[in-house]
Every structure is written in structure tokens, then in C-alpha cells.
Image (cartoon, rainbow, N blue to C red):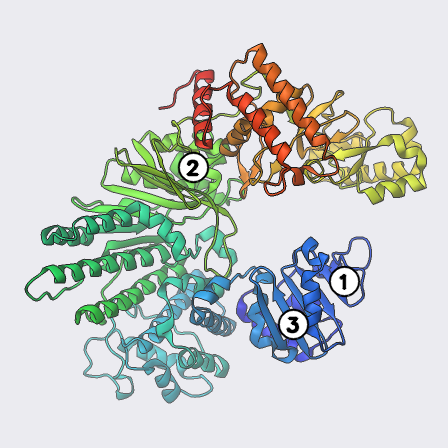
Amino acid sequence: MNIGQIAEKVKLLAEKNDEAEFLFSLLECYGKPKASITRLKMVGKGSYNLSKQPDEVIWKKQVYFKRTNSEHLLSIIDLMKNDETAAKHQPRFIIVINATHLLAVDTKEADTLDVPISELGQKFDFFLPWAGLEKTQARAENRADVKAAEKMARLFDLLREANPATSEREIHWQNVFLSRILFCYFAEDTGIFSSKLFTNSIGSHTSEDGSDLDTYLSAAFDVMNQQDRLNTPHYLSEFPYVNGGLFSEKLPIPKFNRKSRAMLIACGADLNWSEISPDIFGSMIQAVVDPGQRGSLGMHYTSEPNIMKVIEPLFLSDLKNDFEKYSDSKSKLEQLLLRLEHVKIFDPACGSGNFLIIAYKELRELEMDIFKRLKELSKEGLMPLSRIKLSQFYGIELDDFAHEIAILSLWLKEHQMNIKFKNLFGNASPALPLKSSGNILCDNSATANWARVCPHTEGGETYIIGNPPYLGARQQSKQQKLDIHHVFGEDKGVGDLDYIAIWFKKASDYISGREAKFAFVSTNSITQGVQVAALWPKIFHLNLEIHFAHTAFKWGNNAKKNAGVTCIIVGIRNQSPEPKFIYNSSLKIAASNINGYLADASNVYVLGRRTPLSELPPINYGSFALDDGFYTLSNEEKDSILAEEPRAAPFIREFVGAKELIQGNKRFCIWLAEDTSEALSLPTLRKRVDKVRRWREESDREATRKLALTPHLFAEIRQPNSPYLAVPTISSERREYLPIAFFNPKVVASNQVYVIPNAGALEFGLLSSKMHITWVKSVCGQLETRVRYAAAIGYNTFPVPRMTLGMKERITTLAFFLLSIRENYSELSLATLYNPEKMPQELRQAHRNLDIAVEECYRKKPFETDEERLDTLFRLYEKTTGTQHA
């Protein structure tokens, strides 16, 4: 659902204003699933509404809503904001309405909406986050961009409705048409055309019903492609010759009606397009094109601060440093200008061109700074003329629409920079005719020959930048899998690679041995787990190295919908003695070597193992029910069963997963792994067994249908017979230590925890140490930024040095002491105990003492940083496995 459709739905809702159904109808306007809304309306078990009060709805993470007859909405919403309900359920929006007014708070952005319900259609964008369309940053930076996006989306919807596109060729025609009118809007407001030429001409020379508008536009586009004006009709003669290929292709024009013609005129008349930023056109496209395309086609709009994280350490800082270094030398500055003239910027997944546009802008601004300094140094008059050309900028983009907009946006940005140049120096290249910028290719970057798109040239330097499509190994289409194998062949581990690995490999091949570097935004998954050994040897064996890296950070952009992932940035170059840096939050840390885990350590690759590398006991998952929920019980369900059938008590056990382990919640399960004859004689339990049997029998999987033969059993039983240590599969990255705990064998462990049956205090001490969590955070995969524990690659590979009996006894003693401290706070969950802001001081000190004992087993000199710990662990891993990866 796009914003044009949402706006129309909210407008109709506001006109209707059915108080009883208001919230549910509002949620439906923003595309919330009907099944979810139905469950929100339900009363009792299964309802999404967590409130028991009439005229009130609480949907966790979504909304806290009240309907009232009072006029004092402000005092009511203040109470709602500050009560424990809001703190507990964290609704994105808090809303209160009466018969005529709505008052709402966006809790994330601390923004407020106070509006008559009849006017809600004008403020529909307030609730766009429900549709996954975050626009706060864009609105804060430039409201004009957002307004333009909304109007263009409505125009696009109207044209699509009257001109259904059923083939790729027809879609291409519409894409080109949209890019042409965007250019005309921009041109008439920035001095390329005379003021409002395009908009006023349509209003003056076409019928109100739109019937002749396609004919008029076709003629106007033809004229803008003609240098010879001898036979140009008078009513079209004011349109200048544009060239640059924008109007060169004779293509069908969409049919218009009264409504779409009015919207075409409104887009020009109501907006000042000189305020629109070409570098946010990607955000505009995302409001117009189906959002489902963006993840697979790479059409991310990246904010300028994030783009600068790529281009500054890759090349811009170096150029600026040279400017500062040679600011008093006229000859050196002229050489720097010559260098800028021969720089090539290449984005092989360019989307709508954001990276190219920002890079172009930055190079033009640096060039202007150099010219200003040369004027200061020169005794005679200087008439600067920009030497940086659009032909230095290259891109590949699979999506036809984004490809067209990338070309257009570069033209528009060139014009903006030329205006700035003219204001500074009094002269600039003329706006028209446009110069061809034919270096943006519409193609599949995964299979295209990059050297043909951006040829290598002697004496120049090439920088590859961008934000290629991610797509994990399990989310790739058949074609994308073929793309992976096209680039990597059938090498071991290729099937586990993210789609973005293609760009890293192809960029590495492109720059190897040449005056070139690259840097990409990526998900952090390519620097974790099994992907490190599958990808990075192929890069480092080309005599390349990572020269800078931004460690994991939350993705933020100005698009209508954030990519919603945790990202890294990695810069690659040919091996060099020049410095290397790791950026961690606001810190810039010098590194001697940056490996595939983005750690300052040697290029080691940790491979998963079936058994522990060190003297640790075996580890395994807990048991897996595969029961469609019939054997897993809440506390209330457990009590209900026992109230109906007290004899079921021996067959109900506490059930612990990661959530129960960390949060301290209680969950139970029906456990029939032992003597079942009595259990199956109890109707309450027998009903559940029968339901599991039927559910398994109806499964599409043969393995599940076979399990219907033993319906009373969990599908996978790995319950220890002795006390065991439980390790959560997922844990917050904010914690300094893994929250682990011992359980007796009567507590059934789910497959959301790992179990170590023969672990004692020594093992507890080692796994509770900073050394262990540092290792796990580096080599295991992550869920967003949360720690995802993995037995094969995190536990089984954990390098533990040989320890003397005295070392073991000291760790054991300190581990027992730490457990006794935790016992003093038994009323608190591990989540609270290991919250960095709430951790009791005596527990923190007990961990520090344990860390000292563990770390002295690795080396006598105390560790000062996690980077030192990791370097030592990698070295020990290499030594223990008998491998050396240089």
C-alpha cells in the first residue's frame, strides 16, 4: 500500500467517523492485517487487546487507545502517557478521541497530533509508521521533499489506474515519462526553463478533461529534443532544446483524464521544486514504487551521514588532507585539481543514485574550495571552470525506474552545483543543452562485466561505493542463487553466503593490482559465523586488505521505510603500509590488521566443530516439542488442567527456554517421556495427545507424519538426567556477560537453550567470563545486534588454555562465590541482574574477580580492552588447531 492510497482511505474514514469502529478502521487504512484487527476486536483468550476496560484498546507495541465523552483530551492523554500501561506495553501511538476531536502522541518521535477528526485526512502522514513508512527524518530535514513524494505518488496512482502496465516495455515507458516530467518541474523552478513554463503551458494549452494532454506532451517532448527551431509551433517555441538523451526516444504518453490532469498541474503549481533535493529522489521513488521491490532490487535510500561514513575514509578525507597539506602551493593545488578530473566513482548497485550524487557534490565542493584558495594565491585574475564531469560517475541498477531517476538526479545535482559555482565565481557551464551521462547502465550487476561499464584507465583512480542488496542465504530467489554460483562457482560454503557477497567478490576482482579501492554498506552477517571462512579468504588471497571498517550500527535513513537491519561498512584496498582504522560508535581506533570478523587480529577463520576444541563437556540443544502448542503451557493453562485433573501433576514439568531463563518467566510442559500408561488414562491429557497426533498426521513433511506414531513424545528429546547448565540461544548485546544458570533435571530444557549436562562450577566460571562473551560476540552470528549463541562455532571452538590445578581451583571457588551472590538476589531475574545500569555492585565485583582469574590463564599481563582479548583468543585458536592463516 502506498501513501496515495493511505491518504484516500483516511480521508474517507474521517468523513464517515464511526466512533465505535474508528480505531479498527484507522488501522485498516494503514494496511494492518485484517486477521490481526479481528483478534484485536475479540474479547477474552486469543485477543490482541490487552485491556479489560470498555472503550479502550491496548495492542502491544502498536497503540494505546481510548474513546471518551470528555472535552479534556489533553489531561486524559497525559495520564495515559504516564501510567504503567504505556511503560509496560510500549505502544508506538497513544490516542484519545471524543465525538469530534483526536489527540495522539507518537512515543518514538515525541510528536503530537491535535486535530478535528474531520480534518484527519490532511494529517494522515502522522500514522505512517503503522504502514512501515518512517518519514520523521525526511520531514525534519526538508518538508518539501516529503510533500513532493506524496503528490507524485497520487499522480502515479492515477496514471497507473487509467494506463495499466502489463509488460516490462509498458512499465519502462511510464518510468521514462515520470522522469521527464520530474525534470520539467525542476527545470521551471531553477532557471533551466522560464518560471513555471511547463505547468502554465499545460494549463493554457490543453483541455480540462485531459483528453488532449498526451498529444500535447508528446509534441512538447519532441520539441525539447530538437535543436532546429525553424518549424516549431509558436505555442511550443518557449520550450528549449534539452538534449542529453532525456527526450531522444519517441515513447507513448499515458492517457489523462480530468483528475490526473489536475494533479499534474498541482504538482507544478503547489510545489517549489527548487527546494527539492535530488539526493533524496530515492525516498520519493520509494513512495511511488511498490515497496516490495526495494529489498530485492537494492533501492535503499541511504542518508547523507551514512554515505559519508563510506566515502570519507575511502577517498574524500585523503583528498581533503592533500588540500590542507598543499594549501600554500599553487602548483600542488593545480595538480590536485588535475587529480580530481581523473577520479572515477562507481556504484554497481546504485538504486536511484544517492551515493553517486553525494560523492559528486562533495568533489564539486572540494574543487570550489581549491579554486577559492587559488584565487587567494594568484596575483592575476582567475576565471575558474569546473573540470569535474558527470562522465566520471558510473553505476549499474537492475530496476528500470531507479535507473532512469539516477540519470535524472545526477543532471539535477549538476545544475544545482553549477548555480553554486556561478554564485561564487561569476561563471559556470550552461544548464542546457544537457551533456549525456550515459554511464548508468540498467543491468544485473551480479552478472554484468564491471570493467566494461567502468573501464580501467592509466593514471586515474577508481572508487567503488554503495549499498548493494543484502538477502540472506535462505531468502534468495532461484535467480539470485544462480547469481551466487555464477560468481563463486561451487566452492564449499557458497550456499551460506548472503547475496551481498557477490559485490564484495566482484569489487575485489576489479580492484586487485590496480589504483582502486572499494567500500560497501552491508549487513553484519558477512563478518560472523560460517560466512567469514566462506568469503574472506577469497578476498585476502588477492593481496587485498580491509583498511577501515565501521562495526555494527543500527541502520538509519531518510527513506519512507528503513531497511530495518544492523549494518557494517567495510573498506577494501590493495595491501599498503598506510594506516588502518576501526570505527566503533564515535571512536576511531588504529589497527595493525583488520580481519574478516572486523577485529584487530590476524586473518584467522574459525570453522564450526562437532566436539569442543578445549577440555569442555559436550553441549547440545534442549528438547523440541513439535506439538502445535498443545504440550507447552502457560501458568494459567497449567493451573486449569490441574484444577480439572489433579492426577496430571506428575506429568507437568517446568519448561525453560531463553525467555524463561533470562526474564524469569514461568512456563510449563506436558512431559510423557517416561511411564505413560497412567497419563494416557487421564482424559485431559489424552485429548492433547490426540490433537498432537492429528496435527502431525496432517503435516506436509514426511518426518513429522512419522512422529505421529509416538504422539505423546517430544519430537526431539535431549533432556539431561543430571543437573545441567543452560545457555540462552539469544541474548542482548548490552550485557557484559552471558546470563547462564544451572537447573535440575526435572526442569525440561527447550530447544531455545543449549544444555551442558556435565558442567560444574569451573565450566560456569569460564562461560561467565568476559573472555567467552568477547569470543562469542565476534565469531557467532547475530540477530540484529543481539548475541546469537552457536554451539558449533561459539562453544566448541572456544580456545581455553591448559590450566594448572591451582588455576582451576581458583576459578571454581570464585564461580561458587558469584553464584552465592546471585542467590542473594533470587527475587530478581537474570535480565535485571545483568542489565548494565542495574547490576548490583557486589555482583559486578564478583565478575571482575572471576575475570582476573580466567584471564591470568591466558597471559600474566592484564587485558585492557576487548580487542586485546580477541587477539589473544585468535592466536590461541590458531595454535590449538595447528593452522596459520596469514
Closer mark to the observer between disc 1 and disc 2: 1
Q: Is mark 2 on a helix, strand or loop?
A: helix
Q: Name the residue under label 1.
A: 41
Q: Residues within 10 Å of mark 1 (few under 14, many from 20)?
A: some
Q: Is residue 223 left or right of residue 519?
A: left
Where's residue 590, x and y in %?
A: 35, 36
Seen from the viewer's position, the closer of residues 23 and 450 is: 23
Quarter holding the C terminus is top left
**Which mark sits nearer the N-terminus, 3 or 2?**
3
Closer mark to the observer between disc 3 and disc 1: 3
Seen from the viewer's position, the closer of residues 881 and 232 is: 881
Question: How many angstroms separate mark 1 from mark 2 (CA)?
Answer: 49 Å
Q: Is residue 788 above or below residue 808?
A: below
Q: Residues within 10 Å of mark 3 (few under 14, many from 20)?
A: some
x 10%, y 54%: residue? 330
Q: Residues within 10 Å of mark 2 (few under 14, many from 20)?
A: some
Question: How many angstroms separate mark 3 from mark 1 (CA)?
Answer: 22 Å
Seen from the viewer's position, the closer of residues 781 and 109 is: 109
Closer mark to the observer between disc 3 and disc 2: 3
Where's residue 420, x and y in %?
A: 25, 68
Q: Please state which amino acid type lies under the numbered disc 3.
A: Leu
| Residue 443 visible in the picture | no
Q: Is mark 1 on a helix, strand or loop?
A: helix
Q: Name the residue under label 3.
A: 103
Q: In this view, does 432 lie above or below 319?
A: below
Q: In which quarter of the image is residue 148?
A: bottom left
Q: Which label sits on residue 485?
A: 2
**Which mark sits nearer the N-terminus, 3 or 1?**
1
Q: Is residue 468 left or right of residue 77?
A: left
Q: What element carries label 3?
A: strand
Quarter holding the N terminus is bottom right
Question: How many angstroms separate mark 3 from mark 2 (CA)?
Answer: 55 Å
